[in-house]
Image: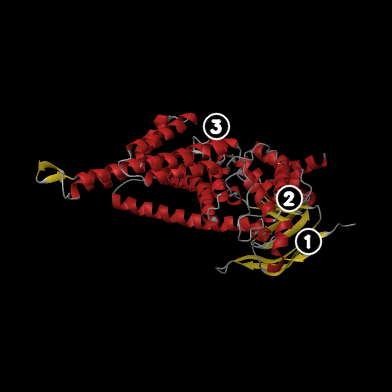
Amino acid sequence: MKSRKVIEINRLSYHYPDGTSALRDIQLEVYEKESVAILGPNGAGKSTLLYHLNGTLIGQGEVIVLDLPVRKENLKEIRRRVGLVFQNPDDQLFCPTVFDDVAFGPRNMGLKEDQVRERVERALELMGLNGFEGRSAHHLSEGEKKRVALATVLSMDSEILALDEPSDNLDPIGSLALTERIRSIPQTKVIITHHLTVASDLCKRVLLLQGGRKVEDLPMEEFLQNRDLLKRFGFDPEFAGWLYQRRKG
Amino acid sequence: MRHAFLDHHSTIESPIHHLDARAKIIVFFTFILLGVSSRPNAFLFFGILVSSLIGITLFAHLPLGHLVRKVLVIVPFLFFVALSIPFLKKDTVGGYNLGLGGLSLSKSGLWILWNVIIKSTLGVFAIILLYSTTPFPKLIKGMERLRFPRIFTMIFSFMYRYSFILIDEMQRMKRARDARCFGGRWLWQSKTIGHLVGTLFLRSFYRGERVYSAMLSRGYHGIMPETMAGRWGWREGLFLSFAPILLILRIYLE
């Protein structure tokens, strides 16, 4: 039995204000607790698609998130329930201290200060960042910033996490550590990445985008064995095969 | 990149550093207000103000020499403005003839010069002490709790957060420029610098858009959420007593 459908996208198209078409006829369904990787070259429309999940962008077509159509009147509710983490943590972290940044969402939700504090502590704990409360973002390493950025949405108890290249700019150890943290989060996840390892470690399903169109939507294990598709997207089939074996093992 | 920018003494452990930011804001602004509104010949009162500030500096384990140097950096600007006054202002009585092509020093001009120097030094010293004893985030919070207009504290807070990123971007662009053999005539340089500034502006503009999206994504609806309450104990009360004591001294000494 399939679980509840949490994201439903029908014939979604989006044009940037200068007329460039970024998404064409996108069709997507995501079920509860699923984790989906979005792969594709630069400019394929991955981020644009992700930004539709919480109404940062609103295109033509239908986007339904948690039974709510993404429309102006639902944005407040949708943004509370969909946590979007931007690619660059310097855009995500705009407060003077880590605590204020992680508390920003819960405070906007109108929670009391002791509830806010509790949520912040829990989110920081999940990301292994206890004791970082009073630090300023500019004194953190890139990996720490990425984790704080994640904590800023975890504190909102979002039901869906939309992550834009969470392991971007990280060294291999930092990337691995972050992947572990993300894996431990039980929510539904939609993750953009360029790293096959990250995708394979975190997701059971792959959505392939190219030129604003959906190329394929298939289970991770099928993708890891599909040499043509792997080559078309610039991945090494040998390495993919190794990842496949590791998943099996 | 890491910066020790503006407030790099603000994380020292000392009784003054531990005080609630509100107490420090009020006391240091009292210093400035009382200093600025005093008569220029209130030497004793100025002496009291300066020695109190020096006392606070020592009590806060701050290096006095470093602070004095910081004050001195700003004073020349004011000094040059003030320096011309004794030569330009004409006295009705008194004044000193220097005998250099009719150049003369006026007594009231000298008083104005002294007035500007002592008051600006005092003011700058108090402000430097304030930000050297209070980390910027706490300073902003203190201002918020003292009911400073929200829009200002918001601007300060963004300015603080993003000044570092701007400096980083500027440094990266400069490095990229220098790596491509930047040099040559001044006119050519000015064009490059113009481009650099323009690029920096555009990047900041787009970053502003992205930051705003990130804020909206976390439920921002036009009002910055209230931050937590502060702690106010007897230490704050004790420190705050500076304000009335100085006020009484000022009235008594006039």
Callouts 2 and 3 on one subunit: no
Q: Which of marks 1 and 3 is in front?
A: 3
Numbered circle sitting on residue A227: 2
Q: Which of marks 2 and 3 is in front?
A: 3
Q: Distance between the residues labelled 2 and 3?
A: 67 Å
Colouring mode (rainbow / by chain / secondary structure / one colour): secondary structure
Q: State the residue position of label 1.
A: A66
Q: State the residue position of label 3.
A: B15
Depicted A112 relative to depicted B247: above or below = below
Instruction: Tell whether B248 sits left or right of B230.
Output: left
User: Residue A148: x and y, percent?
Assistant: 65, 44
User: Residue B159: x and y, percent?
Assistant: 50, 50
Q: Nearer the viewer, mark 1 or mark 2?
A: 1
Secondary structure at badge 2 equals helix
Whether the residues at callouts 1 and 2 have beta carbons within 8 Å, the answer is no
Amino acid type of the residue that numbered disc 3 sits on in the rendered structure: Pro
Instruction: Tell whether A47 sits left or right of B98.
Output: right
